[in-house]
Image (cartoon, helix red, strand yellow):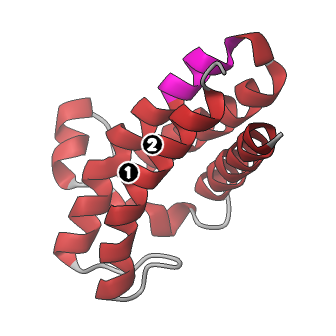
Amino acid sequence: MIRMIARAALAALLIAAGAAHLTTLRRGFRIAVPDWATRVLRTDKDTIVVVSGVVEVALGAALVLLPAERARIGTAIAAFFVAVFPGNVHQWRQGTSAPGLDTDARRLARLFLQPVLVAWALWATRRR
């Protein structure tokens, strides 16, 4: 029962964050995208934010709609959280503010939250 609640909360978090990437907080999320990412991916920061938002929504929806695949989806969610970590480090090192991350302490705390998100995704979606 607790894992089911954790999965639902994780799905809600992903869908809400993804929606924010696509709408109201889109501009603020561009701050977290390192300049090197645009060179490596050969695109602009806005596209990276939009694609990451779409991925978040898709992962959250898949977690709800594809229960038979939840272990694989959990692994994909954990990998996503790892993949976006360099953006969090960049934002902390640059000291740039974004929605909800407007102090050095909050930006640093966000770095320590990332492993918790990875663990949450893996724990909530593992097979008994």
Is residue 71 depicted above or below 122 in this figure?
above
Stretch in magenta? 69-76
Q: Amino acid at mark 2?
A: Val
Image quadrant of residue 55? Answer: top right
Q: Locate residue 118, reporting x and y percent.
A: 45, 42
Magenta part mainly helix, strand or loop? Answer: helix
Q: Residue at x 45, y 53 (%)?
A: 116
Q: Locate residue 16, reporting x and y percent.
A: 71, 54
Would you call the spot at circle 2 few (<14 residues within 10 Å), some (14-19), or many (20 or more)? some
Residue 31 shows in the view: no
Distance of label 1 from label 2 (alpha carbons): 5 Å
Disc number for residue 115 = 1
Q: Tell whether 14 sits left or right of 106.
A: right
Residue 125 shows in the view: yes
Q: Residue at x 70, y 36 (%)?
A: 60
Q: Residue at x 65, y 46 (%)?
A: 14
Q: Locate residue 69, reporting x and y percent.
A: 68, 12
Q: Quick one: 64 or 42, which is closer to the camera?
A: 64
Disc number for residue 118 = 2
Q: Amino acid at mark 1?
A: Pro
Q: Quick one: 68 or 76, which is closer to the camera?
A: 68
